[in-house]
């Protein structure tokens, strides 16, 4: 069997189309970077198809990394060209006016089939999503760590991590089986980052007699990342939690409520198909505690599966920050030692 490019030695490099797919941009964007910033293949040969050597690829990846960190594209390109020893220094061309429909020189302006539907978001969110599309695990982890350290977990989750996850999820749904690997990579690193926050916070927490908060996905629901973020944020505030994870069977969840007597039970449902209304109502009506001092747990419904309208007697936050405010109010109203 023969394929286009078969027999070409590895050092000959990759085509513009192949590199564009790796970066998650369009070939037009790469050509624009070449014209505007001189960020193109070092070797120029006759013919229509140019080849990007490993050094060329490393240079472009560095440009993407720097731009994702907030450095203007022109400065990022100049720094990236200086990264590669012996790479022929070509002057950066004077910026040319764009023709109608031509893409910006920004690495996040792609409207190609590989672009992500991010909308108006923080620069860090764009950089994180692009690193995930490139399957650049090191860059993904670095940007996650920096975002949480700089902005705190709550802001990082609501304005950077969650929007990137949602964009990747939408891309996966619209592209069939493509981009599953991107979502899995991003989800794994986000989970690792959030759990590190939880472990660090729990290690410094003093003992408490307060009733814990139970967090669980309803039966059949496997999307745990939003609950993991809430669990870590509560730990940072010194709140005792019991994280049960994904797809908790109804009987197991009810048994946990009766055993530990939580101050609140947080249930996550990603879709209407998993929203277990009867289970939530059952938990809300379940009494626990010693005779004469029996009480009930507050139930918090989280996730888009429940719909937007709050249900009588049940908490319905819209976002991580609002959930923390509501749970703090629950804890402040509960008598100590109850």
Image (tube, helix red, strand yellow):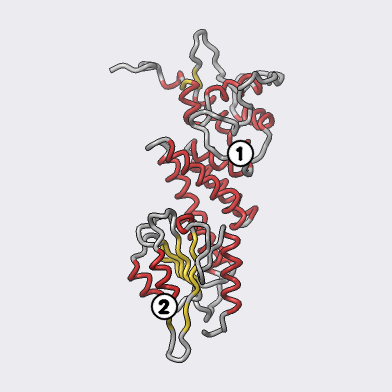
Q: Which residue is mark 2?
A: 286
Q: Which residue is mark 1?
A: 68
Q: Which residue in the rendered view is the most extreme toward the right? A: 94
Residue 161 location (% of width, % of height): 55, 49
Residue at image point 64% right, 54% down:
151
User: In the picture shown, does residue 327 fall above or below 161?
Assistant: below
Q: Where 26 falls versus 126 (above or below)?
A: above
Q: Nearer the viewer, residue 171 or 317?
A: 317
- Name the secondary structure under disc 2: loop
Q: Secondary structure at mark 1?
A: helix
Q: Position of residue 299 (x, y in %)?
A: 48, 70
Mark 1 or 2: the one toward you: 2
Image position, residue 263 (x, y; %): 50, 76
Q: Residue at x 51, y 69 (%)?
A: 312
Q: Is residue 201 left or right of residue 2?
A: right
Q: How many marks?
A: 2
Left or right: residue 146 versus residue 300 is right
Return the residue found at the far left.
1
Q: Is residue 228 left or right of residue 65?
A: left
State the mark number for residue 94.
none
The answer to which of marks 1 and 2 sits earlier in the sequence is 1
Residue 182 in sight in this render: yes
Q: Quadrant of the N terminus?
A: top left
Query: In the figure, residue 320 lies in which quadrant?
Result: bottom right
Mark 1, residues whose alpha carbon is within 10 Å: few (<14), some, or many (≥20)? many
Q: 290 above or below 249?
A: below
Q: Nearer the viewer, residue 122 or 237?
A: 122
The x and y percentages for residue 186 are: 48, 46
Q: Is residue 195 visible?
A: no
Relative to 29, does residue 238 appear above or below in the rendering? below
Residue at 41% over, 59% down: 275
């Amino acid at each position: 069997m023969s394929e286009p490019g078969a027999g070409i030695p590895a050092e000959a490099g990759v085509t513009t189309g192949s590199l564009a797919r790796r970066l998650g941009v369009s070939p037009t964007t790469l050509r624009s970077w070449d014209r505007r910033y001189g960020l193109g293949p070092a070797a120029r040969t006759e013919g229509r198809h140019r080849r990007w050597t490993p050094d060329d690829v490393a240079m472009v990846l560095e440009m993407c990394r720097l731009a994702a960190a907030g450095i203007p594209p022109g400065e990022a390109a100049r720094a990236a060209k200086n990264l590669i020893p012996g790479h022929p220094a070509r002057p950066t061309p004077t910026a040319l006016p764009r023709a109608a429909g031509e893409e910006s020189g920004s690495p996040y302006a792609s409207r190609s089939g590989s672009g992500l539907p991010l909308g108006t978001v923080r620069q860090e969110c764009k950089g994180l999503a692009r690193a995930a599309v490139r399957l650049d695990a090191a860059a993904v982890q670095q940007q996650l760590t920096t975002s949480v350290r700089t902005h705190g977990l709550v802001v990082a989750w609501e304005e950077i991590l969650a929007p990137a996850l949602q964009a990747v999820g939408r891309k996966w749904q619209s592209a069939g089986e493509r981009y599953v690997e991107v979502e899995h990579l991003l989800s794994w690193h986000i989970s690792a980052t959030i759990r590190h926050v939880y472990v660090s916070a729990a290690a410094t927490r003093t003992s408490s007699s307060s009733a814990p908060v139970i967090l669980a996905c309803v039966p059949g629901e496997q999307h745990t990342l939003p609950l993991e973020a809430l669990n870590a944020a509560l730990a940072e505030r010194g709140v005792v939690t019991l994280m049960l994870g994904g797809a908790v069977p109804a009987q197991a969840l009810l048994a946990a409520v009766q055993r530990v007597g939580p101050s609140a039970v947080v249930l996550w449902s990603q879709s209407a198909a998993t929203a277990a209304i009867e289970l939530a109502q059952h938990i809300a009506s379940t009494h626990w505690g010693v005779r004469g001092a029996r009480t009930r747990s507050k139930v918090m419904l989280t996730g888009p599966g429940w719909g937007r309208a709050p249900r009588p007697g049940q908490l319905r936050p819209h976002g991580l920050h609002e959930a923390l405010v509501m749970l703090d109010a629950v804890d402040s109203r509960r008598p100590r030692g109850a």
